[in-house]
Amino acid sequence: MNSARILRHLLTGHLAVRRLFPVSSLTAIEHAIKQSETSHGGEVCFAVEPALNMPPLLRDQSARERAVEVFSLLRVWDTELNNGVLIYLLLADHDVEIIADRGIDAKVGGDEWERICGEMEAAFRQGQFESGVIAGIRAIGSHLQRHFQAGRAGGGNELPDKPVIL
C-alpha cells in the first residue's frame, strides 16, 4: 500500500477538475471532438476522474485498469466498427491512458497510443490541460481519419462528444 498515493487521492477532488477544466475548457474539448469526428468515421471520448474511491485504491488499482472499466462503463466499445477511443485522465495519479477498441487498436497499436499519452502528460506538466487534451484528440483523429474515413459505413455520432467528469 502506497501511503503517498492514498493521500494524493484523498486530497484530489472535483474542485481540482473544475480548476483545471473550467466550463470554457470543457466546451473547447467538446468542440474539438466534434470537429475531429467530421473528418473520420471513428468515435473519441474524453473522461477525467479526480481520484479513485477507497476500495479500488486499497486494491492498488492502476489508472490503466480503471480506464478499461471506464471504457466499458461509457460503452466506448459499443460502436458499429469497433473504432471507439477513450482518453482517460486520472488527476490524482497524473496519468493519461488511451483505450482503443479492437478495430482501431489493431491498426495503430500500443506504442503510438503511449506516445500520444506522453505528449499529453508533458503538456499537463506545463499546466496546459486544455491544449494537451485537444492535441491528443487531434493526434487520435489523424489515425482514425487514416483508417476510418468519414462517410464510410458506421457513420453518425454513436457516442456523446461532451467530456465526462467521473
Image: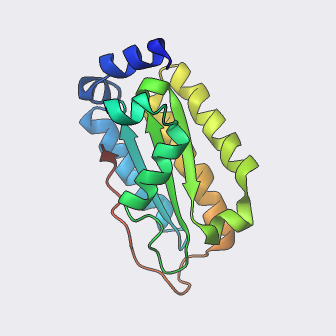
- The answer to whether residue 165 of the structure is visible from this angle is yes
136 to the left or right of 92: right
**Residue 55 location in percent, x, y?**
34, 34
Q: Indicate whether 133 appears above or below 71.
A: above
Identify the residue at horizontal 53%, vertical 69% (top origin).
42
Q: Indicate whether 155 appears above or below 116.
A: below
Q: Indicate whether 155 appears above or below 54.
A: below
Q: Indicate whether 104 appears above or below 59.
A: below
Identify the residue at horizontal 46%, vertical 75% (top origin).
79
**Residue 161 location in percent, x, y?**
36, 59
> How was this image coloured?
rainbow
Identify the residue at horizontal 50%, vertical 17% (top origin).
2
**Residue 21 location in percent, x, y?**
33, 32
For the C terminus, which image quadrant?
top left
Q: Nearer the viewer, residue 76 or 142?
A: 76
Image quadrant of residue 144?
A: bottom right
Identify the residue at horizontal 48%, vertical 47% (top origin).
67
Number of marks present in the image shown: 0
Image quadrant of residue 117?
A: top right
**Residue 125 location in percent, x, y?**
54, 20
163 to the left or right of 5: left
- The answer to whether residue 50 of the structure is visible from this angle is no
